[in-house]
């Protein structure tokens, strides 16, 4: 089976926004930066997490980090020495290959020939955790990774019985694994959002995810092409200041600008007054219209960026 997120990580995924002044960053996305609590995932995402913390200090992300490290340390203490399980002479760091005919315990597909390194074990359950090597990750079907992202499963590792594998020679380094996992993560950054994630990926295809202005420009170009103005909308997010409040009905007339903090800005009218307002804080009121879906995709992206 694949490792599942801890209760604290699952709870973080359920909550929509962080409470400490950063409503634009969703807890679900922060939790996804870590995946499950294991050393390789933490190592793979550490630099990205620290970049996020520098940009938007977040109490919930610090809490998630601490929970993940605590569980990782607990797992290491439970492992004890490096000998794996009651009926195995495998050790942490050993390269192993899955025997022919062994099935993925979650998806039921044949994973014979998949290769990786032993990272931990549960002596009581007589199971081992295998961190897949870079070759296995590279050959992994995108549909498997999409499914894992949607379900909150780890696609970089799996728990099997020690009799399901046998020793083999390594064919890469741990650095190769981290590099390949990072490349795959970038390609599937939005897969956890399901169908909305696929549409978001299509909008941002070929765009450097680290170039904030390029990303915002891609959204502005896309929204100018697909949205039909004017249309009716409702303020869907709490507003700390300004004349508009959550629940107010407005008419959206056109896109006027793009801002690095507020995203795409639009001209709206409300009670004979006109304002410039963040598109990400609006929801189209006509659910059957194409505008509703296009705007919803942008709002979901903005909340999870």
Image: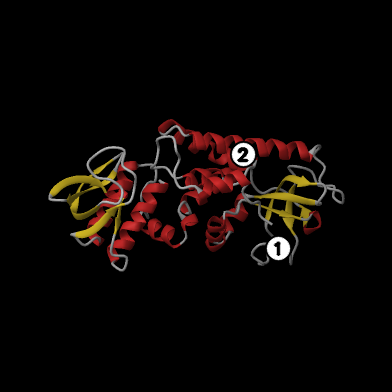
On screen, residue 187 versus residue 282, left or right, reads right
- Vertical comparison of 108 with 85: above or below: below
Residue 79: x, y in percent?
78, 40
For marks 2 and 1, give the one nearer the viewer: 2
Residue 8 sits in which quadrant?
top right
Which residue matches tag 1?
112
In this rendering, is residue 243 above or below 53? below
Judging depth in this view, the residue of 143 and 230 nearest the camera is 230
User: Mark 1, residues whose alpha carbon is within 10 Å: few (<14), some, or many (≥20)?
Assistant: some
**Dot 1 lies on which element?**
loop
Residue 30, x across and y down, in percent: 49, 43
- Left or right of 134, for residue 57: left
In this rendering, position of residue 174 left or right of residue 29: right
Q: Is residue 98 above or below residue 53?
A: below
Q: CA distance from mark 2 to mark 1?
A: 30 Å
x and y percent of residue 202 in the render?
37, 59
Residue nearest the observer in this picture, 83 or 296: 296
Q: How is the image coloured?
A: secondary structure
Residue 103 found in image quarter: bottom right
Per the image, label 2 sits on a secondary structure element best described as helix
User: What's the residue at 70%, 63% (across, down)?
Assistant: 112
| Relative height, residue 91 to residue 104 (above, below) | above
Left-right relation of 299 to 113: left
């Amino acid at each position: 089976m694949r490792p599942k997120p801890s209760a604290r990580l699952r709870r973080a995924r359920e909550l929509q926004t962080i409470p400490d002044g950063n409503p634009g960053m969703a807890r679900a996305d922060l939790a996804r930066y870590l995946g499950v609590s294991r050393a390789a995932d933490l190592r793979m995402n550490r630099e990205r997490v620290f970049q996020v913390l520098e940009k938007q200090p977040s109490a919930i992300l610090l809490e998630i980090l601490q929970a993940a490290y605590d569980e990782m340390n607990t797992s290491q203490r439970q492992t004890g020495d490096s000998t794996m399980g009651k009926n195995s002479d495998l050790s942490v760091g050993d390269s192993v290959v899955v025997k022919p005919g062994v099935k993925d315990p979650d998806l039921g597909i044949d994973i014979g020939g998949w290769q990786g390194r032993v990272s931990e074990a549960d002596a009581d359950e007589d199971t081992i955790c295998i961190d897949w090597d870079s070759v296995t990750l590279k050959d992994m079907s995108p549909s498997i990774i999409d499914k894992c992202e949607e379900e909150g499963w780890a696609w970089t590792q799996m728990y099997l019985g020690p009799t399901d594998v046998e020793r083999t020679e390594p064919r890469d380094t741990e650095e190769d694994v981290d590099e390949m996992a990072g490349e795959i993560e970038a390609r599937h950054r939005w897969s956890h959002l399901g169908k909305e994630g696929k549409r978001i990926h299509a909008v941002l295809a070929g765009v450097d995810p680290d170039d904030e202005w390029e990303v915002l420009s891609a959204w502005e170009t896309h929204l100018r092409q697909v949205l039909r103005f004017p249309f009716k909308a409702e303020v869907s997010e709490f507003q700390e200041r300004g004349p508009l409040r959550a629940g107010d009905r407005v008419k959206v007339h056109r896109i006027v600008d793009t801002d690095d903090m507020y995203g795409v800005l639009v001209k709206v009218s409300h009670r004979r007054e006109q304002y410039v307002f963040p598109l990400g804080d609006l929801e189209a009121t006509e659910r059957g219209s194409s505008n509703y879906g296009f705007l919803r995709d942008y709002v979901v992206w903005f909340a999870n960026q």
